[in-house]
Every structure is written in structure tokens, then in C-alpha cells.
Image: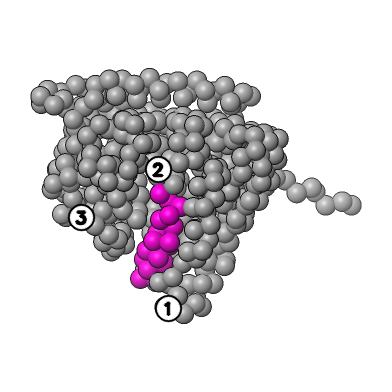
Amino acid sequence: MTSPANTNPIDPVKLDRLAEVAIKIGLQLQPGQDLLLTAPLAALPLVRRITEHAYKAGAGIVTPFYSDEEATLMRYRNAPVESFDRAAGWLYEGMAKAFSNNTARLAIAGDNPMLLSEQDPEKVARANRATSKAYQPALEKIAGFDVNWNIVSYPNPSWAKQVFPDLDEEAAVAKLADAIFAASRVDIDDPVTAWRDHNAVLRERREWLNGHNFASLHFRGPGTDLVVGLADEHQWQGGASTAKNGITCNPNIPTEEVFTTPHALRVDGHVSSTKPLSHQGTLIENISVRFEGGQIVDAKASRGEEVFNKVLNTDDGARRLGEVALVPHSSPISASGLLFFNTLFDENAASHIALGQCYSKCFVNGDKLTPEEVAARGGNKSLIHIDWMIGSGEIDVDGINGDGSSVPVMRKGEWA
């Protein structure tokens, strides 16, 4: 008697489509261009599919780097305390050099969002700070949009069990895989065309916002009355964008947002989160903050408040905004009703703001601005960039013109 064949809960056809979309839409990888790829060890099947599609597209050299959850936990359990103030700077310097040489960047997300939930928060905070400092040379190349880059996701079993705790592992992986494929538009026969159509819709929205050139946005709803001043000469982005190397790419798959840069000194009022923020193993719930002159002066959370305050104390720019994004409440990710515990997905379920570093791309002629010129226009600088959701079906957004008049932008979470 033969044993039943092992069933694969992840549809191999859709996984291959995701890899193809990552290369053809996410990166638009060019012949001869190298690719640097990072992924959790569990995502090896997707790494192999992406690598194949990359070489078929003419890639120069594909170099994958893997992370391992067990190895990460071994550090927290056994490493000397002083080691948490250090990071592998040589690695990030090498990444920055690669990006300077026009290497494309692709990240596969999928780590267990609660991996560090039971570890010492002080160690986690110190390690995050050390890594953020070390990563800065490479992050500047990504935040500055020097090269084409992209993030996609893989249904790692430990992540799947967080999203679907009541299912066994195989069923949880299958459900999360289906959710990822649907949100990433690869559950249809021609996802490349679907992405081109979706990008056209996002382009219309950003062009409408750029045409109005609002001075600020006013968010109103339960627990929220917030005026987000927009940076001088800001520019809305969303969907496909052209990097400084001339390659048009989709940095995030999935994506439902149009976004721009707030003015670091012109945010006032109070705002409440509408979804939990999953950050480095901590679920931060019911965030409520008050801004004065662009800076958070009061912050509360019903859960994870200590960790949230450590984030805010990262550096001088961590209490200021680097991004504001508009997402309709009816987006496919919102309609799924799932909390993914993953910012790539959860931020595309609701309008959101991001603490920390701004994107220089979100300025008129941003690819030509120096860091000093970005700062002079109101762009924020920080070691962090952390998105959290403030939109819902109860939030209205108005665009405020320079003369104080207003234009409806969103009503009850939908484009007006």
C-alpha cells in the first residue's frame, strides 16, 4: 500500500504568476541588470520561481540573502547583551554599493509578525536602532528611489498561523496563499494586463490630486480631527513610478494607495488608528496621538504603548510624518476583512500615515533634489518609516486650498 502523496497547499500556477508579476511589473527588470533579493528561508519556492523569471528576462546576476526565524531567536536567547548595539554594517554597505551600481532590489515579506513578542523589548529596540543606523546608506538609495525595487509576499507557515489561528497549519497556509494571490492580482489568467489596468486607475487619482495641489488634507471622523499640511512642491505618487535609473516599476505588490509627503512642521490635531500596528513582534492597538507643529506631543495606545513610545524616541524625526496615503475603504484588502499583521497588506486596506523618513520621489523634480533641498521643502528625515492606518468607512477627507477653501476628497472612506 502506498502512502498518499503530500499535498501542496500553495497553488504552484499562481505562485509562478506572482514571480512573473514581481519581475515584469514589480521591477520591470532590464536585460543585464543584477538583482539583490532578500527572503525568509520558508519562501525558497518563490525565490526559485523569481530567480527563473529574472534570468529569463535577461538578469545579470541574481543574489539571494535568506533570514531564518530560529537563528534570529537564538540570538535573543544566547547572544551577549552588548551585541544588540551592533549590526552587520558591512552587509548594508555592500547593498548600498550594489544599488549605486544599478542593482535592482526585491524583498519577499513573510516573517512571523509575532516572532519577537516574547523577547526582551529593550533588546529588540536596541537591535532595531543598530540595524536602522547600519542600513541607512542602503535605505537612502531605496527611499531616494535610485533604483527599481519591489516587495512581494509569501505565505510562511508561522505567519499564516497568526492570521488564521483556528486552522491547522496546512489549511492556514492555503488560506493565506489565496489571500496573497487575490490581493496581488495573480488569481486571474492575465495578471500582467490586470496590473497595467490597475496602474492606470491609480494614475488618474494621483493626477487629479496633483492638479489640485492642495496645501493640506483635513481628516475627520471618530477620534480624528487632523490637518496634515503638505510639503512645498509635493507630488502625489501611486502605482507604477519611474526610478532615477529610468526604469518604471511597482514598488509594492499589492498596492491600492496614492501617497505624498507631508510637511514635517505643519501637522496639527489628533488622530486615532483604525487598525492595529504590528511592529517587531508587538501588536500596538488603539493608537491615539496629538500633533502640534508637526510633532507628536502626546501618544497613547491600549496595547503596546511602551514599544510605540520607544519607536517615537528613535530620533528627532520619528515623531514627525514622512508620508500620507489615501486608500478607499472598499479596497480588495479591506473587503477581505483580514488583519494580515503585515504592513504591506494592512496599509492597503485603509488611508494611513507614516512616521519618519519621507520619500524624495514625492516632490516635483524630486530625483534632482539634494537632501538639504528636500528638508527645505518640508521633507522629514529619520531612521524609521512606519505606516499605521487611520482610514475607515467613517472617515471624511477634504483637500484644503491655499486660500482656505476646501474640496471633498473622500466621503465615508470612498473617493468623493
Kindly report the distance in space between the C-alpha atoms of the residues bearing marks 1 and 3: 29 Å
Q: Is residue 202 left or right of residue 74?
A: left
- Farthest-out residue, right: 1
Residue 307 position within the rendered picture, expressed as x and y whole percent measured from the top left: 31, 62
Residue 78 position within the rendered picture, expressed as x and y whole percent measured from the top left: 51, 78
Q: Quadrant of residue 313?
A: bottom left
Residue 249 position within the rendered picture, expressed as x and y whole percent measured from the top left: 50, 33
Quarter of the image that includes the C terminus: top left
Q: Earlier in the sequence, mark 3 or mark 2?
A: 2
Mark whose residue sits in front, 3 or 2: 2
Q: Could you classify mark 3 by the number of other residues whose Cα lies within 10 Å: few (under 14), some (14-19), or many (20 or more)?
A: some
Which disc, if any, is residue 299? 3
Identify the amino acid type marked 2. Gly
Answer yes or no: do the residues labelled 2 and 1 have beta carbons within 8 Å?
Answer: no
Q: Could you classify mark 2 by the number of other residues whose Cα lies within 10 Å: few (under 14), some (14-19), or many (20 or more)?
A: many
Identify the amino acid type marked 1. Val
Residue at x-position 43% and y-position 40%: 145
Using the rendered image of the protein, determine whether residue 407 is visible from the camera's viewpoint: yes
- Residue named by callout 2: 144
Kindly report the distance in space between the C-alpha atoms of the residues bearing marks 3 and 2: 29 Å
Q: Name the residue nearer the viewer: 362 or 197.
A: 362
Tell me which segment is drawn in magenta.
122-140
Q: Is residue 76 left or right of residue 225?
A: right
Residue at x-position 45% and y-position 64%: 116
Answer yes or no: do the residues labelled 3 and 2 have beta carbons within 8 Å?
Answer: no
Residue 156 position within the rendered picture, expressed as x and y whole percent measured from the top left: 58, 51
From what the image shows, is residue 249 above or below residue 146? Answer: above
